[in-house]
Image: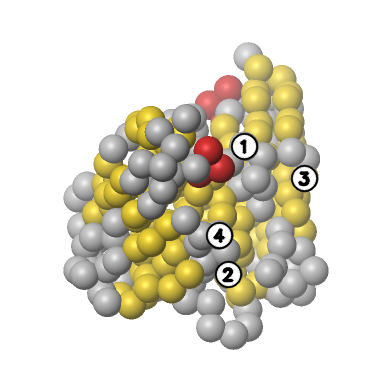
Amino acid sequence: NAGVTQTPKFRILKIGQSMTLQCAQDMNHNYMYWYRQDPGMGLKLIYYSVGAGITDKGEVPNGYNVSRSTTEDFPLRLELAAPSQTSVYFCASRWTVNYGYTFGSGTRLTVV
Amino acid sequence: TQLLEQSPQFLSIQEGENLTVYCNSSSVFSSLQWYRQEPGEGPVLLVTVVTGGEVKKLKRLTFQFGDARKDSSLHITAAQPGDTGLYLCAGTNAGGTSYGKLTFGQGTILTVHP
């Protein structure tokens, strides 16, 4: 099993550009999450999904959008990139609420 | 918003020493997890604790969940250079509808020198 696959691994965007961070899992997990990680700040929840067609905002959703058309895929869309969105983005999934997360290897995004 | 305070933020020790990392909150968690993260990779789950007072051991690592389920600790015995990394605690809200969302502490960067 591949687990959680994130693409791309690195990306540089110019201010105002848009992009989609891809996330796919092959474990048939219903719960999926997007976090961003900034130095010394732990991980902050951007959006999450409890199943196909169901998404909701996390702690820091501004400037982002998500969709969940299938169980496997949970893409994160950045519209009008800003320097404040420079971060490392992690996608994660879990089987049920008390199970551990399986994380992807992350996307390092720089907005210049 | 529930907060998890981790301490210390940085820890630099020699091989063979013991260490303890703390994770504290004023909120009650239904479960608490510890993760380890290496540079360029995502966090990897070490353990989940769900019962107040629970102690779990993973080789040289001992994890404890506080009786009131508001705090946890990670103790490493005889640290090795391979233990170097970022250690994160994360809790699931005990009340309401959390949908399994985790609240993360800010992390402890551990460096073990040979």
The answer to whether residue A5 is visible is yes
Q: Position of residue A66 (x, y in %)?
A: 35, 63
Q: Name the chain letter of the residue that bears numbered label 1.
A: A
Find residue B17 and report its image quarter: top right
Badge 2 density bin: few <14, some 14–19, many ≥20, Cα 10 Å: many
The Cα atoms of the two marked residues, 3 and 4, are separated by 24 Å
Please say which color scheme the image uses: secondary structure
Q: Name the chain letter of the residue that bears numbered label 4.
A: A
Q: Name the chain letter of the residue that bears numbered label 3.
A: B
- Going by the numbered disc 1, the residue's amino acid type is Pro
Q: Are marks 1 and 4 on the same chain?
A: yes
| Marks 1 & 4, CB-CB < 8 Å contact | no
Number of the front mark, 3 or 4: 4
Q: Position of residue B25 (x, y in %)?
A: 76, 64
Q: Give the residue pinned by disc 1.
A: A39
Which residue lies at the image location 65% right of the left edge and 34% below the top edge?
B109
Which residue lies at the image location 73% right of the left edge and 24% below the top edge?
B13
Query: Which is more toward the observer, A38 or B3?
Result: A38
- Going by the numbered disc 4, the residue's amino acid type is Val
Q: Is residue B45 above or below residue B76?
A: below
Q: Is the C terminus of chain B in the top left, top right, bottom left or bottom right quadrant?
A: top right
- Indicate which disc residue A60 carries: 4
Q: Secondary structure at mark 1?
A: loop
The Cα atoms of the two marked residues, 1 and 4, are separated by 16 Å
Q: Pick out the residue farthest to the front.
A: A16
Q: Position of residue A12 (x, y in %)?
A: 38, 30
Q: Position of residue B7 (x, y in %)?
A: 77, 45
Query: Which is more toward the observer, B59 or B69?
Result: B69
Q: Is residue B88 left or right of residue A5?
A: right
Q: Give the residue pinned by disc 3.
A: B7
